[in-house]
Amino acid sequence: MNKQPVWLHTLDVQQKYPPLKTSLDIDILIVGAGITGLTAAIQLKQSNKSIAVIDAHTIGSGTTGSSTANLYVPVQNYYHQIAAKFNWQVASQVAQSRKAAIDYIEQLISQYNINCSFQRRPWYMFTKLPENRLTIEREFAALTYCDMPVDFTHDLPLTKPFTKAIKLDNQARFNPLRYLYGLAEVLVKNGERIYEQTPIVSHKEYKDYCVIETPTATIKARKLLLATHIPVGFNFLQLKVYPYRSYAVAARLAQDKYPNGVIWDIDSPHFSISSHSITGEALDLLILAGNHHKTGQAKHCCHKKQQQIVEAYLKTHFDVASIDYEWSAQHYQSADGLPYIGLASRFSKNTYVATGYATDGLTYGTIAGILLADKVQAKVNPWADIYKTTRFTPLASAVKFTKENLNVLTHYLADYPGNVESQDYLAIKPGEGKIIEEQGEKWAVHRDENNQLHRVSAICTHMKCLVKWNDAEKTWDCPCHGSRFTIDGEIIEGPALTPLKKKLFHRGEEPV
């Protein structure tokens, strides 16, 4: 079984564009070559501004490449809940903006002839539990109010029993990496610059420009767009968005009969079921995703168990020939249920961010790219106010804001009074990772399958939380703000800008 997301594996993702080696002086720098960053770049390519896109890894290799590749108007937070927190006008604007984003993707695919298996298809939501019928009914009423042509249905493309279901036609699927590669080619042909394997180590805003440092170059930009899923470095929005991981498996079905659509089972735990085309245009793979938890906070500290729950659901409800892929992905949930898209803070004039997409990121990421491009050009956009980063929504935010930040505080308090998992290197078995304290310092130590020890600081470089071992992906994950690191301390994702400090064992020192 492959542990890499299906899109990254099937396209054999490799570095296509060079790292940045020389300093730049440009109008607009976009950090992040996922769907948000490249959408913004496409929107800006006719602006007569000099533009560059940089990415710490490769195009689409972050959250976009780990997605389930579905495009839909419905949202994880439900429109009836958005209406309750805000009002019906806001709910309707969110729905209309998401519909427009899907149409926009289809338009770009047609305009630039991008071969990415885009197909329209239905979305379904169902329950088998009587107590969840009201949720279905409320969401039907909400989508109807938002002028979405939703219907109750007695037919699902599944054999799973249900008591209530709704259907919304004309949603979509595509191959997100092929889409991004297509956009990148358009940008480069237009004269824009893309640099991969180019992380930033700092960024600072001045009166009329920003200065961004990478390991090999300095960039001066009049405008800075942080399309990094969460603002990197320190930002107040990190108190208002919260990191979660969800799990996915991709399987071949024995009878080669795949349900055409994206289907939400809203019973606990919630699962999303969808089918895709990998080898051609015909459906040939089923993706099941769900079962999320706070990053670094898996139940019983066992991430493998979370993955096994997804696999068990799959095998219970489908005739599985083989499970070919399994992976997890990160998303950020916002305090009030809507993304934050706009200026990095009330004091910023030249730095822009986008975050808090929850699990609806491909569509929200497209909206964000459009909005960010409009904002840096001072263009009016009808959706700007509902997503603005500086909105003040105490009634809509209070419960989640308090709960999530108390959770972070709990980790700070629990981690620091000498709470370690082992004092003995020899107690760490192959495949395990534990926190060890030596002379007052805490170290994150992993023993690999070759019995080799890897030792890095256990203190996250972002805001000093203790990292936690992720046994499924062999990573160190921060439970506070979602930074994730390799066993050797390199940054995978999250707001951290500096790797974990590495401490090598000297000859003769390493325990065996």
Image (cartoon, rainbow, N blue to C red):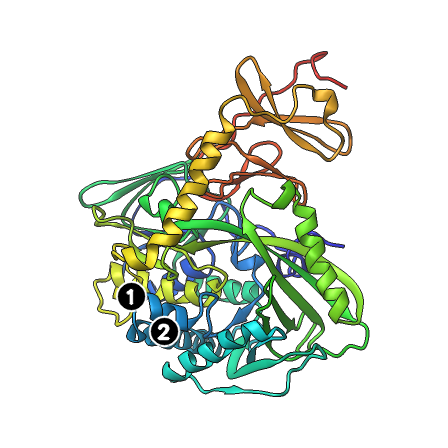
Seen in the image, is 453 located left or right of residue 144? right
- Give the CA distance from mark 2 to mark 1: 10 Å
Which sits earlier in the primary sequence, circle 2 or circle 1?
Answer: 2
Q: Is residue 45 above or below residue 209?
A: below
Disc number placed over residue 177 in the picture, else none: none
Locate the N terminus and report the quarter of the image it occupies: bottom right
483 or 16: nearer the eye?
483
Seen in the image, is 354 located left or right of residue 7? left
Quadrant hosting residue 174: bottom right
Q: How far across and down, in percent of the image, does residue 102 sit?
A: 45, 75
Quickly name the residue at label 2. 97
Q: At x 49% / y 44%, what residue is drawn? A: 482
Residues at marks 2 and 1 touching, judged by CB atoms closer than 8 Å: yes
| Helix, strand or loop at mark 1 | helix
27 or 210: nearer the eye?
210
Residue found at the far front of this picture: 131
Seen in the image, is 206 located left or right of residue 196? left
Q: How far across and down, in percent of the image, does residue 209 sit?
A: 23, 45
Q: Residues within 10 Å of mark 1 (few under 14, many from 20)?
A: some
Does the image show residue 16? no
Q: Is residue 234 above or below residue 226?
A: above
Quadrant hosting residue 449: top right
Q: How far across and down, in percent of the image, does residue 166 sit?
A: 54, 82
Q: Residues within 10 Å of mark 2 (few under 14, many from 20)?
A: some
Q: What's the residue type where badge 2 is placed?
A: Ser
Quickly name the residue at label 1. 386
Q: Is residue 473 above or below residue 186?
A: above
Q: At x 70% / y 21%, what residue is drawn? A: 425
Q: What's the residue type where badge 1 is placed?
A: Ile
